Structure formats: C-alpha cells, structure tokens
Amino acid sequence: MSARVYLSAALLATLAMPAQAVSIYAGQARAAAVCSQCHGVKNPSADAPFPPLAGRDEAYLKTALKQYRDKTRPSDIMNAIAGSLSDDDIANVAAYYARLKP
Amino acid sequence: MKKIITKPLAIAIFAALSLPTSLHAADEAHAMHQLYQNNCASCHGSDHGGYLAPALNADTLKGRSPTALRTIVMAGSFDTLMPPFYGKLTDDQIRALVKHLQATPKLPNPPFTIDDMKASLKVYVADESKLPEKPSYAIDNMDDVIGVAARGKYGRGEGSRAVFINGKTHQKIGEIPTGTAAHIIDYNPANPRWAYVKTDTAEIFKVDLYSMQAVRSIKTGWNGPGMGVSRDGKYIMAGSFVPHNAVILNADTLEPLKTFELEGIDPDGKQVSSDSGMVIGTPFDDIFAIALENAGQVWVVDLKDDFPVTRITDVGHHLHDAFLTHGGQKLMIASYDDSIVAAIDLKDRKIIKKLEAGCVPHVGGGSAVVVDGRTLGFGTNFGDCDKTVVSVWDLDKMEVVKQVPVSGGTESPAAHANAPYVAVDIISKDRRARTIQLIDKKTLEVVKTLDVGGHAYFPEYSSDGKFLYVSAGYNGDEVVVYDSTSLQKVASIGMESPAGIFAHGRVRYVTRGLSPDEMAQAQGAKP
C-alpha cells in the first residue's frame, strides 16, 4: 500500500517537473557514451580534426545539435550521431559541456 | 654505355605500358602498407599479428563485413583505445585499407637487427656535461617525481608524451613528446636524473629529469614495451613483441651491446620463436630476467663477459608480467593460460612453486605489503571467466592466503607501506571500467569503490604514500589524484589517454608496497 503511495508521489513529481529541466548528470553520461569518443571530455586530441565542446555556449550547442539532427546543417557523421539524440539528450548534453571548464 | 642504359629503360617502359594494373596494385599495396604502419601498427602490431589490439590480417578478418570494418575505423570502438579515424583518413583511404587488411597475411617475424638499432640512434643533446646540475624546477626530492605514460588519442602524434608531475603539488613539471604511445617509464637506480621511456613502437628515450628533455633515443624493434634497468644503472635490457628479440643497451649512450633471439622449447615440447614479456632488473644481483611469452621460459642474463644466459624452462603457458620479492631474489611471474603465478628463485635459478592466481593473471607492476609480520603479495587478473578475484599470497610460505572477490577483471594493483588500502583497477567493459576498488590491507576485504571516470586504470601511490594517482584513460583524458586515507579527490591533471603511472620512488622499493628498508637490506647484501 505504502509502496503505491510513494510510486504515485514519484509520478506526480515527474509530471510536475518543468519540461525544460536539464540534468548535467544525464548529460555527462550521454556525453561519455556519444560525444567524448571524438570531442574528448575537456579537450579533443591535439591531433583530432574535431572541435572542443567544453565551455561552449549552451544555446549554440543546442542549436547546432538540432540543426545536425534535422539535417539543416549537413555532416555525414554528425547527422547520424545527432539523429540518435532526443530533445532531452540535447538539452542535457549542451548543459553538461557548457558548464565544463576546458 | 648509352646502350646499357637505354635497354633496361626500354624494358621498364614496355613493362609499365603493358602491365598498368599490376604495377598500380603494387603501388597501392605499398601505400596501404605505409598507411597501416603510420596509423595502426603501434597497437595492432607491425606484423599484422596483433599487439595491444587485435590482429588485422587475411585470416583474422576472413568473412568480416568490409562495411562493418570501415565503420569501426571511421567511428572508433567504444570503451577501447580504438579512436575514430573520421577526418584523419579519407573515405577512399579507409576503403582501400580494409581491402588491404583482408588480403594481407600475418608477416613472418619481420627483422629488426642490431644494425637497424644502431642506425636509429638519435642524439638530441651531444654534450651532457652542460646539463644543469640540479632540477630546473622546485622539488623537495626527486622521489616525488611521478611519470605518466600518455598514449595520445591516436597512439601517436602530439598527444603521445611522457608527462612528469610533482607528486606533492600535483603540478606538471615536464612533458617529453615521444612520437608514438609511451608505455613504460623506468628510472635509473644509481642516478636520480635519468629516466627511460619506452613506446609501443619499441623506441627508448633517455630523459634528463633535471632539464626535462630527451637527450637520446633508439629504436629497439617494431613493437613491444618490455624494458628493465640494471641495479647499477649501467645497462638497459629491452624485449620486443615484434620481432622476437631482445637487446642489452649501454644505459648511458643507448648503444646496443648484444641482441638475443628469443626461442626455445615450450612446456609442450615444441621449439618455438617467442615474443618478449616482462624484462626486469633486480636489486638482488647484476642480472636481468626476461620472460619468453610463448616459449614459457624465463631467461636470467648475467651482466658480465658476453652476457651469458641461464634458461629456466616449463615456467608456464603464455608468460607475461612479474614482480619481485625478498630483496629481489624471488620473481613472481604470471602465466595467462595456466592461470598461475610461478615463484622463481633468482639465486638458484629454479621454480619454487606455482600458485593459483585467479583467471588469466596480469600482475601489472605487482604489489606486496607487510601485514602483521607476513609479506603479502597481491595479484590482479583479467578474470575472463566467472571468477573475478584478487589473489593474496603469503610470499614467505608461498601459499594462497585468500582470493578477494572484486567487481570485475583487474589489471594492476597499487600498494604503499604508508597507505591503508591496496588499489585495484576494474577493467570489465561496462560502467565498472570507470572504477577503482580498494582492499583493506588488514581485513583483505573491498571497502570502497571510487568512480574515477573514463577507463580508470593503473593506480599508483605517490612516493610518500599520501596520494593515490589513477589514470582516467581512453576518453577520460585526465589523471585523477586522491588522498590515500580519506579517498577524497584532490586534483586532476589533463592529458591525452593516460595509461601507466610510474612513481620515481619505485627505485627505493623492491616492489610497490614494500618498505624502503627491504631495499636497504637487499643493497646491504651486495657482494
């Protein structure tokens, strides 16, 4: 009985959360799995042809990822990778990288 | 005279005109061979036989989809050292490379002779007498130096460096570019200013730690990290994975003195050519010990006359790394395929005993600690089976004390006489790879798990035992420092794909975790 009360309370809390709430922890996990292979965490490799993401403007990162996702900004590799990201993923990843000191 | 020149020329022109495709194919094969050597060979092996990374040849890639292989090359492989080559190699290059790999057999032990080594010797500082007499940076004691082998994202290039850090302030004090991935750092036991860095392409750099620069380098083979320094600091022995040889160098000039072909009769009675496993100098005697991985032998080389060899046979199947105990008289060497660690007496040059060691033991630099009067050795293992334990041995009685359950496979243990925990790196390929587990020296139980990030491996204590250094490798790109008692994070030092960490204090210990007193005893026993 009590478990059910907690569960519905948790559900309510989830529903009550504003849609734009971002989680830098979720962003960190997604970045580690998706972005860091090329872009690194704080810095990409000195030899890599990939731009750094740490400390970049959050709004810019979000816009760029959405453009890559809807292919208005063409790139073989980024169109494919951004295509796998949800709106939440994009918000979280952008928030994470924007707050990271390069 | 004229005729002699024109005739071959005419033939050549005729050949070129009549055989355009085969000439083109030869050019292409040559170009792809170069591309492979310049981008892949430092990890996958110059002979296509595999090294840190899988073998890439016609046999191992048979039936694999070229599209899938191209994807791996382009995007890299998650949670491995394989980087994305998108943007570094063109699509055409990647296509041609995959085609080339699927058509190329493993090369039969490509030679690298003593003359090749001599020709590769480079001198960066001709007059070493002009080097500064003391460190050109603030440091209390050279034992505080910690070296990190930064592989570089691509296993070569700008990011490949030996990075030296002050283990008290956690500030970088110098970086030595190594061209390809740095793998092992050794220090000269007789003179604190010299360090030796070996790369995965078997180059050895002699580094002056006072002025933080490489003074000389030599290439000792195609691939292989094996390197040891003799107790008097006069000799280096280096062993290669490709080709199957080893060499003794003058540690001062890096000039090669003698090469050894690594071959012998394996435990199954077959004569085999063997790559080199660990190479180790010992405070116990003027010798080197070298493991012949495939031959299952340990060779003891005396540093006198023509460097005579004593062969200890039937040590185990697929030997790899080792550590010393008892003043350096006893060598504990891991056998991957037998899942044992063999104890060898370097005085009698005999096997003492074979001890159970988990599953595919990889002891790393090894660790030993004295607890309540007992000397305990700690053995990590890849744990490629269900059994993920760290073995604890009583090194006096040579018996298993306990197999401590840990959360995954492990690669390297760290211990220090002044630190309460033995740290082991969990390497299982999922989120566990981000972690380090700490085993209480007294209770022999895991008491804490640190989430370091990246692929956390190669823990190492600073020489005073106050700090625990860990590489957050692969995409972690930092070395993370913890207080060794509170286990609070105290610093982060950025670098590309850090791997092995080597405290200068190692020259004061027989093995990490033992007190410097043990070393003093060993040196007191010098003949």
Image (tube, helix red, strand yellow):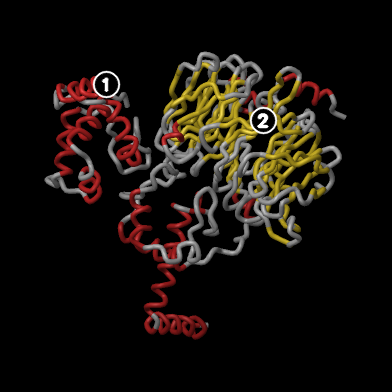
User: Secondary structure beneath disc 2?
Assistant: strand
The image position of residue A33, as x and y in percent, is 33, 38
Quadrant in the picture for the C terminus of chain B = top right
Q: Mark 1 — on which chain does it sit?
A: A
Q: Is residue A98 visible?
A: yes
**Which residue extends farthest left?**
A72
User: Which residue is at the front of the view, B418 or B141?
Assistant: B418
Q: Residue at position x 57%, y 32% from top?
A: B405
Residue A1 — which label?
1
Q: Is residue B210 visible?
A: no
- Does the CB distance between marks 2 and 1 fall below 8 Å? no
Please give the residue where the numbered disc 2 appears in the rendered image: B402
Are the residues flagged by discs 2 and 1 from a single subunit? Answer: no
Q: Residue at position x 55%, y 45% from top?
A: B384
How many badges with numbers are in the image? 2
**Location of residue B301 by image quarter:** top right
Q: Residue at position x 23%, y 22% from top?
A: A10
Which-is-in-front pick, marks 2 and 1? 1
Q: Please tell me whether residue B423 is drawn above or below residue B205 in the rendered image.
A: above
Q: CA distance from mark 2 to mark 1?
A: 46 Å
Q: Mark 2 — on which chain does it sit?
A: B
User: Secondary structure beneath disc 1?
Assistant: loop
Q: Amino acid at mark 2?
A: Lys
The image position of residue A13, as x and y in percent, is 19, 21
Counting other residues with Cα less than 10 Å from the Cα at mark 1, is it few (<14), some (14-19), or many (20 or more)? Answer: few
Residue B79 — which label?
none
The image position of residue A96, as x and y in percent, is 27, 27
**Location of residue B409 by image quarter:** top right
The image position of residue B113, as x and y in percent, is 66, 57
Q: Amino acid at mark 1?
A: Met
Counting other residues with Cα less than 10 Å from the Cα at mark 2, is it few (<14), some (14-19), or many (20 or more)? Answer: some
